[in-house]
Amino acid sequence: MRFKTLTAWLQWLEKLHPVEIDLGLARVMLVAEHLKLRSFSATVITVAGTNGKGSTVAALQALLSQPHNHLTAPKVGAYTSPHLISFTERIVVNGEELAESVLCQAFEDIDQARIQTNTSLTYFEFATLAALWAFARQPLDYILLEVGLGGRLDAVNIVDANIAVISQIDIDHESWLGNDREKIGFEKAGVLREGQLAVIADANPPQSLCQRLDDLACDVRWPQQVAGANHHHGFDIVSDSELLNWHGVDSQGVRQSIEHLPRPKLAIESWSAALQVGLMLNIFGAVTQQPDSEEVRSIDVASLMANIQLAGRLTTYQLANRHILLDVAHNQQSIQRLANYLSNNEPKQSRVAIFAAMADKDIAAMLDLMLPLFDRWYLPALQNCPRAATPDTVRQLLIERQQLSESSQQDPLQGKNADLSVDVYVQMMAKVEESLLEAIHSTTQNDKIVVFGSFYTVGEALTAINAAKAGNLQL
């Protein structure tokens, strides 16, 4: 074996291919065919989109793991990316992360196949093949595959899915996917297949995506209410209640509803997509009437929605009597969702931002949305992440956006002048961990600390939080 530890393998993989991102299926398909990793007896569900992919996979994983139909203990494999702390988070079988020793064997077999086929692979392509390698070695009922980037040329797309899910589409990764929603929609539509079951969870789908659905004669369901449609899909609020009703269309084209559901911890759009997939797979079973009780479904959807959570998606931690909110929002659409959450669901209190993002993002637009919501900003450098914007770059953008905001208002933002207040409001830091400690020391009990901007930012914060809770980091 080339390496005996997962750490050594990953360090090697980071430098193996000439570039980090190299879209295209020819190389990875060659190795996959050599290893016989392109066909599965399990039902394969591919999830593409800009935002909400990970949450959709998490909701699907929760639903499909429940006993249904003839399956008393359904076996589910899930592949997601990126990870927050450990690479093993990416490949999960029956709720358990793949052991490092198993991953090492997967990498060894893939490496040998790569050599035998004289093929170069990227880090992500190695990871995708490792997931397929693991899924091929045990009986599974469902395989969930999250697209990493785009869809058409993403390594995940070497597998023909039984159901394709496309979540919300927004402008992101423009260098690879294009700079408007039509171009990006076309790339996402690349996961579709002729006659395939498809779930489109975007309320305003690009025309390029709709055209592809028509060209392939896909059997489509829309779990979000599409503008101009004469039907109602997705969630609505029960009158005079905090509860929700959900509406979808089953495999026979019949409208179905699931009623009296709580507001979920995961994104509501992700749950809507997952429930629609469940309907198409007929996993909910018949509704049964119990004597003197309400109707009961075989799967307790309400309990799942109330309890299933995904790290880094509007997740809150308590540390040193501070509320720390982690969210992987990293583009304008997801930042808008975070801003709405803070504005509508959080009491107005002192808020501190810990923010770092990739240099290829529209950081200025992200800052415009968040500027009014925070009293202080900490801008850390991300560790081992050359794609990240430097703290000084973000600082300059923050000052510019603050000045523009002040000049457009009769009353300056927060009653301060940006040139004079920058040292108070903005502080550059060497690490996310250092930012977190400084934020804790500079706030009072019950103040809110919000960490956002990228998976890397949240991952480093979560590592620090875990270390502090284990007593390995002095607060």
Image (tube, rainbow, N blue to C red):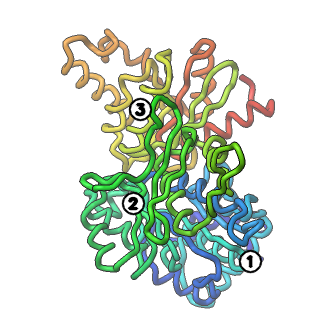
Pointer 1 or 3: first along the chain: 1
Badge 3 density bin: few <14, some 14–19, many ≥20, Cα 10 Å: some
Going by the image, does 472 lie left or right of 55? right
Q: Residue at x 45, y 36 (%)?
A: 338
Relative to 251, say whether 232 is above or below.
above
Q: CA distance from mark 2 to mark 3?
A: 26 Å
Residues at discs 1 and 3 in contact (Cβ within 8 Å): no
Q: Closer to the camera, 81 or 165?
A: 165
Regarding mark 2 in the picture, which secondary structure is present there? loop
Residue found 57% across the figure and 49% down from its top: 384
Q: Image check: 154 left or right of 433?
A: left
377 or 184: nearer the eye? 184
Percent position of residue 90, x then y: 64, 60
Neighbourhood count class around disc 1 (C-alpha, 10 Å): few under 14, some 14–19, many 20 upward: few
- Is 284 positioned to the left or the right of 423 in the image? right
Real-space Cα separation, disc 1 to disc 2, in angstroms = 31 Å
Residue at mark 3:
339
Residue for point 37% across, 55% down? 202
Q: Nearer the viewer, mark 2 or mark 3?
A: 2
Task: Please state which amino acid type lies under the numbered disc 3.
Answer: Ala
- Above or below, 67 relative to 427: below
Q: Position of residue 386 (x, y in %)?
A: 48, 51
**Residue 222 circle label:** 2
Closer to the chain start, of discs 2 and 3, is 2
The quadrant where residue 206 appears: bottom left
Q: Which residue is mark 1?
A: 139
The residue shown at (68%, 33%) is: 465
